[in-house]
Image: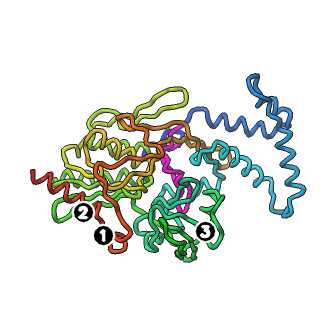
């Protein structure tokens, strides 16, 4: 993880992907120059009279914004809303900022209140109270992106692709990610009921007991057959150190091959994904960003490449998103690994995180990212070299045909 002197973390956002641990999950932020200054300017505008704000926001090339309308709506809600005591100035103010972000139509551009921003930070630290799943918006429907290993969500049987129809009996249609997060999160020991729809099946209710979620993002196993399995569930605060241990084990033990399991990994820190890819790729760009002013920025390999000579299979599925797709896409384009599994999620945008006054934060989509070969995977994902489906019958019978295929590929390569 790379942190600038101003304390702004740089990483790739994973699907708004909200951690149902539950929280808005993070992916690829990087420091945005002068954005705090711009936000502070807007705060100052709102403190002025409507006339001053309207004049400041109007330009010669666009109609003047009439801020009288804003204050009219504000005052009407304060005066006439039936539950008047619930309409606080803070709720109205934060709600208007959320609406401003939502008006972009981009699910990854989000204003976070101080409470939500703190939860976001806690999630990256790897400790949560919730159920241990991540969600995103797909075709306007709240969908499970990935249940995390060893969590109540995983034990309860939630699967990637499950659509959340209701939470504790309340329909989720039209519910924002933030509202959904607030309903699913809760103190350990308490229960939450999710009504989910899986593929074409009828809705089913799953009762989950919340718990403290502490997740190590990397698990490494050296199998008796000499294959090293590196399972990466997120690109979080602890990933860099844990992956370094995995690389050291590979250098020491010289395995026959490596299985890098990125299934149901929603992403995380951009620089961590770049550094991990660099363990296979000696030189060249790992990922490129394209901005709205036609500016292009590339992230090069750091040149370590300690794993470049090990046959490698990368496992992916529909829950593999953002930073996972950056890593898998780079290894695919440089022909350093065989991708096995199912088409990935398809999240190809970059967000910048701005720290705002009073602990609030704003995530803004500022760029698209491309693989080294120039592939823009947004909404289409990465198609594996070898497609292997995981069926419901496989799940029910504890079978993993994708993992089995990876073993077969590595054993066949070793035999040559």
- 185 up-or-down from 253: above or below: below
Secondary structure under the numbered disc 2 in the rendered image: helix
Write down the region rendered in magenta: 8-31
In the picture, residue 86 is in which quadrant?
bottom right
Q: CA distance from mark 2 to mark 1?
A: 9 Å
Q: For residue 25: magenta?
A: yes
First along the sequence among labels 2 and 1: 1
Find the residue positioned furthest to the top.
Answer: 60
First along the sequence among labels 2 and 3: 3
At 73% across and 23% down in the image, what residue appears?
A: 61
Q: Which residue is mark 1?
A: 399
Q: Which residue is mark 3?
A: 166
- Callouts 2 and 1 close, C-beta under 8 Å: yes
Q: CA distance from mark 3 to mark 1?
A: 30 Å
- 82 up-or-down from 49: above or below: below
First along the sequence among labels 3 and 1: 3
**Whole-percent x, y for residue 235 in the image:** 41, 52
Q: CA distance from mark 2 to mark 3?
A: 36 Å
Q: Which residue is mark 2?
A: 404
**Whole-percent x, y for residue 172 in the image:** 63, 63
**Whole-percent x, y for residue 31 in the image:** 53, 38
Secondary structure under the numbered disc 3 in the rendered image: strand
**Whole-percent x, y for residue 337 in the image:** 26, 47
Find the residue positioned furthest to the right.
Answer: 79
Whether residue 303 can be seen here: yes
Whether residue 272 can be seen here: no
Q: Is residue 326 left or right of residue 357?
A: left
Dot 3 crowding, Cα within 10 Å, few <14, some 14–19, many 20+: many
In the picture, residue 177 is in which quadrant?
bottom right
Q: Is residue 167 left or right of residue 230?
A: right
């Amino acid at each position: 993880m790379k942190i600038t002197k101003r304390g702004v973390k740089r990483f790739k956002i994973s699907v708004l992907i909200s951690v149902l641990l539950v929280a808005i999950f993070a992916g690829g932020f990087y420091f945005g120059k002068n954005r705090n200054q711009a936000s502070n300017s807007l705060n100052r505008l709102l403190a002025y009279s409507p006339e001053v704000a309207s004049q400041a926001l109007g330009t010669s090339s666009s109609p003047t914004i009439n801020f009288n309308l804003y204050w009219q709506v504000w005052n009407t809600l304060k005066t006439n809303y039936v539950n008047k005591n619930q309409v606080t100035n803070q709720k109205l103010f934060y709600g208007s900022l959320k609406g401003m972000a939502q008006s972009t139509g981009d699910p990854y551009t989000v204003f976070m209140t101080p409470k939500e921003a703190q939860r976001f930070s806690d999630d990256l630290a790897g400790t949560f109270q919730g159920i241990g799943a991540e969600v995103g918006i797909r075709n306007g429907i709240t969908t499970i992106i990935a249940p995390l290993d060893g969590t109540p969500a995983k034990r309860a049987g939630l699967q990637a692709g499950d659509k959340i129809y209701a939470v504790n009996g309340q329909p989720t249609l039209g519910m924002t990610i933030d509202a959904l997060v607030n309903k699913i999160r809760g103190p350990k020991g308490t229960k939450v009921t999710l009504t989910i729809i899986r593929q074409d099946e009828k809705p089913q209710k799953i009762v989950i007991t919340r718990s403290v979620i502490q997740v190590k993002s990397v698990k490494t196993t050296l199998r008796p057959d000499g294959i090293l399995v590196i399972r990466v569930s997120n690109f979080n605060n602890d990933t860099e150190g844990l992956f370094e241990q995995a690389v050291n084990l590979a250098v020491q033990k010289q395995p026959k091959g490596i299985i890098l399991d990125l299934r149901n990994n929603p992403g995380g820190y951009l620089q961590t994904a770049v550094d991990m890819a660099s363990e296979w790729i000696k030189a060249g760009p790992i990922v490129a960003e394209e901005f709205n002013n036609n500016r292009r920025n590339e992230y090069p390999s750091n040149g370590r490449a300690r794993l470049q000579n090990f046959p490698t299979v990368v496992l992916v599925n529909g829950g593999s998103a953002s930073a996972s797709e950056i890593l898998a896409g780079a290894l695919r384009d440089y022909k350093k690994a065989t991708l096995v599994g199912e088409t990935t999620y398809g999240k190809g945008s970059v967000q910048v995180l701005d720290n705002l006054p009073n602990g609030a934060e704003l995530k803004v989509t500022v760029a698209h990212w491309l693989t080294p070969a120039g592939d823009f995977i947004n909404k289409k994902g990465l198609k594996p070299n070898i497609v292997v489906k995981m069926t419901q019958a496989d799940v029910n019978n504890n079978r993993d045909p994708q993992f089995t295929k990876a073993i077969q590929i590595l054993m066949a390569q070793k035999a040559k």
